[in-house]
């Protein structure tokens, strides 16, 4: 009872005006994606920078403009396995208006596969996992190649090793010019070992792993990494997530 009371007090405490306010929308995912564990790690990672204050919402249906109003940033850690697990038009419209008005959005890992048929979500995403678009080889170690060293999220960063993660490939992309790639990784087609579900021409292709979009006055930062809890704890993931979140919320990066 004491633990429950403490959690309720934490959720209901007034926001700290000195910090960026973040709301994680979660509560459902697919397969081995451990949404509750990864949401907790993401919350801790952001709050450890002392730049963010984070709350987690596991009951997203019914969320409207009043719920989103206190926040600078929404992070999506969600996948709808059936049409009944969609958030519903009022909540989806509220998120669209939240971003369009100039707030920030972070889309994390398999949330790129969510909400098939929600056109505005796909515009905010830039690239999505869709039928016949989206696959990966077995999780493995790889390195990120920075595509834009002058972008605030990437400026000053050196090598970016990824210890073990999924490397998303062959996503369904919005028109060129509507998304901006920050970093890629080389998708070695030999690693599919004949089990690729989609065409893999040539020896390999560099695939976008980090990118941004603009939607109205708002900004989206997309990070396709983070399949395992251990992947979310990885230093490279944490640095990129925190810097991307700050950029999405404010348009600049102050974190080292």
Image (cartoon, rainbow, N blue to C red):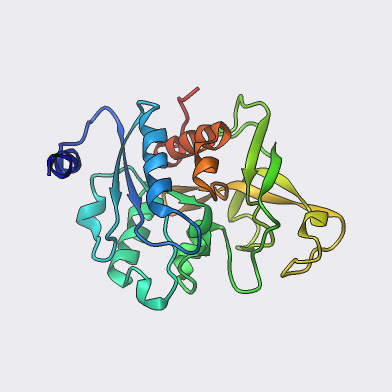
Name above or below for residue 131 compared with residue 57: below
Q: Can you tell which quarter of the image residue 25 is in?
A: bottom left
- The residue sitting at 77% across, 59% down in the picture is 192
Name above or below for residue 6 compared with residue 198: above
Name above or below for residue 11 compared with residue 36: above
Q: Can you tell which quarter of the image residue 196 is in?
A: bottom right
- The residue sitting at 60% across, 74% down in the picture is 131
Q: In the orientation shown, which residue stands out farthest toward the right?
A: 202
203 left or right, relative to 60: right
- The residue sitting at 71% across, 41% down in the picture is 142
Q: Is residue 104 visible?
A: no
- Residue 190 location, x and y as percent? 83, 55
84 left or right, relative to 7: right
143 left or right, relative to 74: right
Q: In the orientation shown, which residue stands out farthest toward the front?
A: 1
Q: Can you tell which quarter of the image residue 43 is in?
A: top left
- Residue 140 location, x and y as percent? 69, 46
Q: Is residue 4 visible?
A: yes
- Residue 81 location, x and y as percent? 45, 71
- Residue 69 or 106: which is nearer the viewer? 106
- For the N terminus, which image quadrant? top left
Count of residue discs: 0
- The residue sitting at 34% across, 59% down in the picture is 27
- Residue 11 or 158: which is nearer the viewer? 11
Name above or below for residue 34 compared with residue 40: below
- Residue 71 location, x and y as percent? 28, 44
204 left or right, relative to 221: right
């Amino acid at each position: 009872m004491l633990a429950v009371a403490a959690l309720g007090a934490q959720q209901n405490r007034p926001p700290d005006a000195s910090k960026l306010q973040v709301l994680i929308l979660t509560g459902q995912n697919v397969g081995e994606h451990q949404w509750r564990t990864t949401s907790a790690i993401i919350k801790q990672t952001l709050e450890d920078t002392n730049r963010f204050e984070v709350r987690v919402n596991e009951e997203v249906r019914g969320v409207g403009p009043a719920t989103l109003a206190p926040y600078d940033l929404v992070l999506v850690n969600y996948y709808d396995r059936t049409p009944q697990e969609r958030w519903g038009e009022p909540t989806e419209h509220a998120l669209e208006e939240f971003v369009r008005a100039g707030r920030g959005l972070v889309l994390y890992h398999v949330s790129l596969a969510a909400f098939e048929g929600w056109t505005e979500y796909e515009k905010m995403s830039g690239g999505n996992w869709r039928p016949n678009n989206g696959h990966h080889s077995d999780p493995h170690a790889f390195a990120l190649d920075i595509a834009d060293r002058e972008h605030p999220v990437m400026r000053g960063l050196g090598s970016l090793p990824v210890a073990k993660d999924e490397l998303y490939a062959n996503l369904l992309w919005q028109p060129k010019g509507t998304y901006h790639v920050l970093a890629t990784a080389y998708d070695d087609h030999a690693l599919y070992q004949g089990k690729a579900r989609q065409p893999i021409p040539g020896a390999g292709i560099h695939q976008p792993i980090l990118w941004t979009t603009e939607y109205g006055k708002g900004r989206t930062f997309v990070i396709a990494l983070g399949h395992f809890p251990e992947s979310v704890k990885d230093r490279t993931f944490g640095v990129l997530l925190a810097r991307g979140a700050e950029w999405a919320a404010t348009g600049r990066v102050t974190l080292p």
